[in-house]
Image (tube, helix red, strand yellow):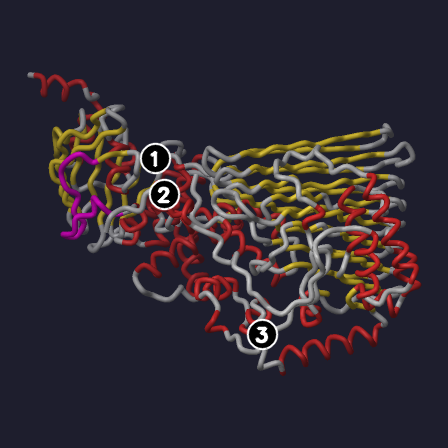
Amino acid sequence: MSKYTEDDLKKELETQEYEYGFYTDIESDTFPIGLNEDVIRAISKKKNEPEWMTDWRLDAFRIWEEMEEPEWANVHYEKPDFQAISYYSAPKKADPNKSLDDVDPELLEMYRKLGISVDEQKKMQGVAVDIVVDSVSVATTFKKTLGEKGIIFMPISEAIQEHPELVKKYMGSVVPKTDNFYAALNSAVFTDGSFCYIPKGVKCPMELSTYFRINEGGTGQFERTLVVADAGSFVSYLEGCTAPARDENQLHAAVVELIAMDDAEIKYSTVQNWFPGNKEGKGGVYNFVTKRALCETNAKVSWTQVETGSAVTWKYPSCILKGDNSVGEFYSIAVTNNFQQADTGTKMIHLGKNTKSTIISKGISAGKSQNSYRGLVQINARAENARNFSQCDSLLMGDQCGAHTFPYIEAKNTTAQIEHEATTSKIGEDQLFYCNQRGIDTEKAIALIVNGFSKDVLNKLPMEFAVEAQKLLEISLEGSVG
Amino acid sequence: MLKIENLQARIDDKEILKGLNIEVKAGEVHAIMGPNGAGKSTLANVIAGKEEYEVTGGTIELNGEDISELAPEERAHAGVFLSFQYPIEIPGVTVTNFIKSSINESRKAQGLEEMPAKEMLKKIREKSELLEIDRKFLSRSLNEGFSGGEKKRNEIFQMAMLEPKLAILDETDSGLDIDALRIVANGVNKLKSKDNAVIVITHYQRLLDYIIPDFVHVLYDGKIVKSGTKDLALELEEKGYDWIKEELNA
């Protein structure tokens, strides 16, 4: 048998298309392209929204019109034409004539590798789920359990109808409409998203996952998520899916706001696997997300993210540590391959006394991709005894990719303790040969090395999610070698 | 077991092995000695299939099958094990996890199921006791922050776990203190059987006091220039390599 050389692998990588980039033409109710006040009103009307919501959107739109698209991130892309996008598309419906036999067998193989159930596969492929008993009963039991505890978990459009007082109070309180270009755009046009409220002292008995909401419509292009954890409560929230996300929208501008009141804790985990573009770097999703959490006294927020998809990622899940003794954590794995670009990191804003933050960022670059960590640790004048620990590690595969680290530190209080560690390493021939000699082939060796490198972050994910994320890392780097 | 005939290999444009012959039978221990730059480590790496080396002539047969065109992992699956002179580090991957992957990949190649966890644990316990390895050591990242002795002991531990047909120990004695040397050598001796073979590559005859070779070969300028028994190693220790060079030039 002839030897499978590095060149073969490189060739394979170059010819490896994103097999999941096809889209299915299904019945949808779509607005004509373009954005103006009439379109905003129409979206609001379509969603049957109260007047205050329409006004809020219009206000955001007017703010957005005055803003310029930011250029400071270390990414290069063709700017979207905002007048060439359609801002409303009704939830996709299942096609009753479609079965899994119509789905690309390679895609099914990928699902199999990820251990995704047949029902889930069908949902993701827009195939009507015929054996619904399981998922329906799970979802129903789930809703009942949550209801008994007074937990609210529903699409944000429903929450606007059913819990206007909560939405009105908290939406935009952490990420104001004026925050940035994409946040303003999202505020004007968001069509979907989740709302979650955990009452005082309640520990949410299960991981809240957007999966349970998928029945009620796919993920929107401009998603808006609002999680409010009242005093002393706890919630673990999972967003996204390890399966490749089917989406024809190029621009994604989501906003996520978390509010952790006194003594509350929120764990927010994300796996992002949007279409990254083809081997020439054409197509692919632009993922421009604003995620921010507000922590009151003794509150704690952990952001954990595994980013493997998108052509361009621009995302900084942040914590405003407003209350004394509050804690912010950010754990991130960002993988870029081919022509992907990621500029991601976090902001930890220390306002209260004895506030603590931890940042662990692992960047993995392969192909011709560029991977940047950008972080801000800001200690304000009143934040006595604030502490931060940051660790940013980069792993390079091959000699055509890049890893960059931009750590910003602003300390205005002399009692602050700030530590920053950074490493850059490369998967070397010697490492691969060592693994090969022990019977482990190159693909598997890379997976092993990457998993070892990412372990500190994978450990922070809920168990089941971690196993899936680990497989996802392997698949994302399949065919790349250092 | 292993039959190498007229092996020629180079790295970049430098000829290193220039027509090397050696035959190792099952149940035998062979020592290969020689001065720096003679090609000892090259031989080890070429047998294991390291890509940087180009084989320009000759054959490497393992149990009658020519392995010189196989990928390194395929040679490993066929039973070749190399104890590295400089074992590499893999941060975040524990010794246990690594050996587990290693064993299961080999089993997969042979069409076997993964080794059941219970059996794996039992084997790990046995072999770590054999090599006097602290169990805590097994949950550390592979070779990361290991002392020289720990790295070498870990190599032999992997060998014990994998039970290769042909084990090549490349300078396993370097960096070992006398106690570690004794433990490692004891381990190798206990693993020896009539069905496997060991090639010990070493600079000094010190290791050969513990692992007694059946044959000793002198590698010089890319060829085996002299073969003998254990006495040859003692002679080399006493007289150095110059007399061999002189003998060859005479």
Which of the two marks, 2 or 3, is nearer to us in this view?
Answer: 3
Q: Residue at x 68, y 44 (%)?
A: A81
To the question of a shared chain for discs 2 and 3, the answer is: no
Label 2 marks a residue whose chain is B
First reached walking from the N terminus: tag 2 or tag 1 = 1
Region rendered in magenta: B55-70
Helix, strand or loop for disc 3: loop
Magenta includes B65?
Answer: yes
Query: Which residue is under mark 2?
Result: B184
Mark 2 burial class by Cα count in 10 Å: few <14, some 14-19, many 20+: many
Q: Is residue B38 left or right of residue A98?
A: left
Magenta includes A420?
Answer: no
Query: Which residue is under mark 1?
Result: B173
Q: Position of residue B239 (x, y in %)?
A: 19, 21
Mark 3 burial class by Cα count in 10 Å: few <14, some 14-19, many 20+: some
Q: CB of mark 2 within 8 Å of CB of mark 1?
A: yes
Helix, strand or loop for disc 2: helix
Res A95 label? 3
Label 3 marks a residue whose chain is A
Q: Residue at x 81, y 34 (%)?
A: A378
Res A137 label? none
